Image (spheres, grey):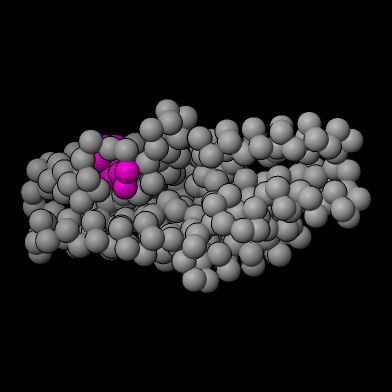
Amino acid sequence: MEQLRSSWLTHLNPLTDPSSLSVYILIFHGSSDPRSRSASEALTSHFRDRVSSTQPAVGVANKSTIAVKSDSFSSLEQGTSSLLQAQPFDPDLFVHAAYLECHPLPLHQQIEQIAQQIQAKNPLKKISLRLLPVFLLPGVHLLEDIPAEVAQAQHLLGDSMMLTVTAHLGSQLGLGQLLNERISPLPMDAWILLAHGSRRLNANQPIAALANDIGATVAYWSTPPNLESRLQECVRSGYQHIGILPYFLFPGGITDAIAQAIAQFSQQHSTLKITLAEPLNASPRLVDLLIDLANE
């Protein structure tokens, strides 16, 4: 996998073809909670660092070979066969964040603004925009809202550049491995994978399958079976130490509410020990999954 990711990083190089540019936009849900905004900016920054690691220090490489450790944000080895005269590489130009909600501009205008900014600085280049939905669940936002916003952005931009939407982050098979790595050092009598949940038909099936893969019981915050019912089942089974793994990207209002619900339940069951893990956050492994996503 590491060798494959190394070759994919070469593909990610925005300037491998000097006549064209590949630009990556990470699309987040958006939140009024500053912790969520800070975490999304950190994840975007780490992804940008990984993409920019495919660039030479001066000029533009038309061929590069990068070897990258999956647990590191920096490249270990880089070779270039030739350099082309060009403007210095500006990593901020090729990786951006955009938000579906809680932003002054609607998503389609954010995309248009980013595209116009890049085109103005590179008027002679062919530009392609790859949009990466950083969403865990295939709900209404992913299936309806984002496609509608992207269609509006494409209409505004016309044929000047092509917009391509990748699969969403939650579709990545590597998420199961990431979650296993989170829970394996913490032995529990039982683990509960707690996701937001969706009322759309069959939308929760991937989460249930993911929970099964990591040996956890699934619960949902907005739909049944909810957290309390799963905790009651654990109590009836005689479990004493239960782990809660929140299937959320970043901390925010819901993760705060989960912590409060666990505290209230613990008061009613004083012999029960409940451990609440952190959400996914901007980890190196999450960046690996975004790199994989960008190359699908």
Q: How many marks?
A: 0
Percent position of residue 83, x then y? 27, 47
- Quadrant the N terminus occupies: bottom right
Residue at 50% from the left image edge and 47% from the top image edge: 287
In this view, the residue in front, 86 or 206, is 206
Residue at 62% from the left image edge and 39% from the top image edge: 258
Q: Is residue 29 visible?
A: yes
Q: Is residue 61 visible?
A: no
Side of 195 relative to 236 (left or right):
left
Residue at 31% from the left image edge and 47% from the top image edge: 100
Side of 158 relative to 223 (left or right):
left
Q: Does the magenta run of residues contain 96? A: yes
Task: Tell me: residue 115, above or below residue 19.
Answer: above
Percent position of residue 214, x then y? 72, 59
Percent position of residue 33, x then y? 43, 31
Magenta-colored span: 89-101
Percent position of residue 56, x then y? 35, 42
- Quadrant the C terminus occupies: bottom left
Residue at 50% from the left image edge and 35% from the top image edge: 253
